[in-house]
Amino acid sequence: PHRNNKGAASRMSFMEFPYVSGPRKELMVELVSTLQTRLATQLLPCDLPPDVQYYQNQTGTAQATLHVRSGIQSSPIDFILGSWLHCQLPSGGELNITSLSAYLNLLTDAPNFLFELIQSSPTSMVLILDLPPRKDLVLHPDYLKTFYEDTQLDRHRQLLEKLPEVKPYTSSSLYIRSVVSPTGILVSIEAQAGETERMVEIVRDHVSPIAREVLGVWLDVCVSGEREVKEPERAYLARRDQVSKSKTIEADLGSSLPRLFGQEVADRVIKALEKFYNQ
Amino acid sequence: PHRNNKGAASRMSFMEFPYVSGPRKELMVELVSTLQTRLATQLLPCDLPPDVQYYQNQTGTAQATLHVRSGIQSSPIDFILGSWLHCQLPSGGELNITSLSAYLNLLTDAPNFLFELIQSSPTSMVLILDLPPRKDLVLHPDYLKTFYEDTQLDRHRQLLEKLPEVKPYTSSSLYIRSVVSPTGILVSIEAQAGETERMVEIVRDHVSPIAREVLGVWLDVCVSGEREVKEPERAYLARRDQVSKSKTIEADLGSSLPRLFGQEVADRVIKALEKFYNQ
């Protein structure tokens, strides 16, 4: 992998994924390409400033990219957001996060898409894969049936949990726990010390096919499904989307970005993202 | 424990808990007594028909009691519901369920209380302990903060999950998964084969103190807290309570009661309960 020295601003692009394993890079490139191909006519180009598309800390030990594309007016896509983050840890290890999420707008009330891999050592990873609901499932059992029961999303979680390396993961944020669906995959994957090849294998043979399938369900059922939203549900949905996006960015980036990149860089990045999360 | 022969209708009462371990019986009696004492002036007597307060199947191999008390008009208590169920399994084992739940009405939007132990063998048990929210937590982070963060409910779950016998439990019903809070305790407790004393110990030393504390939080923060509910939130809450209660009874009893007690008994019991769940 490329290493940047202090000040050597050789910017890297989102689609390079320079610090992760081959199968993990292939998966990310494939998912992003699938999204961009299927939604080709609906997406505007990424217009983030260059210093938000790629950013690093002062010493170059932490680097990240951001890629955000909004949907055109007639599209149900609000925006899609991809990113990777690489950080050398004081312990000598590395933190590598790759993520891809997609948010729908008020033309539909169908669920969003969320996929994130957080690797804190060669043998330890957290996987988050879900279609977070945009309605209160307790009040709307029909919504639960359409998007979660009829699509049989739970079988992916069940398959994955059969692997001895896989354990349920509990986010420390109660809000994040509230946002995920009942079929949401939140697991930690821990291989035995030294078994770094096993992690690569699990991503290739287990995580990849499941992520592909869940993205397929999202594209087929959520993006393409006809779901007209009328008042007063529309006002309710707008408020819920807004709260959920701003609380998610707060829980996800609010504390970690300043710590990893310094306050100045963090402020710049969060400000650029707020445009999407608060619209 | 008492055993009923076929037709020998020696009715047992709810507070007897004849088929469970000493510590489990003590816990149930204590929790029910705490509730009835703290809410003494607010509860009406149980007016279920005798053949719903105690019921059994034709052969007497399955027996159960139900105890429901509604709140008086000025009370925020909708009703409290206690039950135990005992069933001899074809495998030779026993199923023993004990449960206590409490539902609030539209005078408040505070969470309900739910506690259930489902024991399918001397060394295997499922524990459900939660204050299920009555609002959409994604839309209402302030509600999440008041009832789940400020009350530090998550530390009970964390303590319990440190025991090697305790694993997260995933309900097969996606609806039940949606109903619980992010600090909800849904765990299976599995002792080693033959270690029946260890299960009794876990109930006495770990489950009991936690159940006591969670009920205390519910009484102090949820029942006693002032939470005025105005329109249009009140109409929303009424609808959500109604859907949630009827879906819960469907998921919880709809399939198991006919199987264990026969259709006739099941119909009688569910009909008597619907009065409370559908009001």
Image (cartoon, coloured by chain):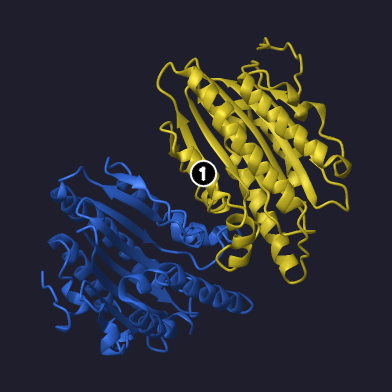
Chain colours: A blue, B yellow
Mark 1 packing: few (<14 Cα in 10 Å), some, or many (20+)? some
**Residue A114 percent coordinates (x, y):** 37, 66
Q: Pointer 1 indicates a residue of which chain?
A: B
Location of residue B137 (image quadrant): bottom right
Q: Is residue A38 above or below residue B154?
A: below
Q: Quadrant of residue B22?
A: top right
**What residue sits 46% from the left and 72% below the top?**
A250
Asked whether, in this view, residue B276 is left or right of residue B75, the answer is left
Task: Examine the rendered structure and indicate whether residue B2 appears above or below residue A254.
Answer: above
Instruction: Pick the quarter of the image with the N terminus of chain B.
Output: top right
Q: Does any portion of residue B40 appear in the rendered image?
A: yes
- The residue positioned 87% from the left and 47% from the top of the image is B72
Residue type highlighted by circle 1: Arg
Q: Which residue is mark 1?
A: B157
Identified at 73% across, 21% down, the residue is B16
As drawn, the residue found furthest toward the left would be: A1
Q: Front-most of B6 and B95?
A: B95
Of residues B146 and B136, the one drawn nearer to the viewer in this rendering: B146
| Left or right of residue B142: residue A158 | left
Q: Position of residue A207 (x, y in %)?
A: 25, 55
| Residue A53, image x, y percentages | 27, 83
Spot occupied by residue B237 in the image (x, y as percentages of width and height): 70, 62
Q: How many numbered discs? A: 1
Give the camera-side residue of B264 and A259: A259
Is residue A224 visible to the viewer in this orientation of the structure?
no
Using residue B122 as the reference point, say whether residue B212 is left or right of it: right
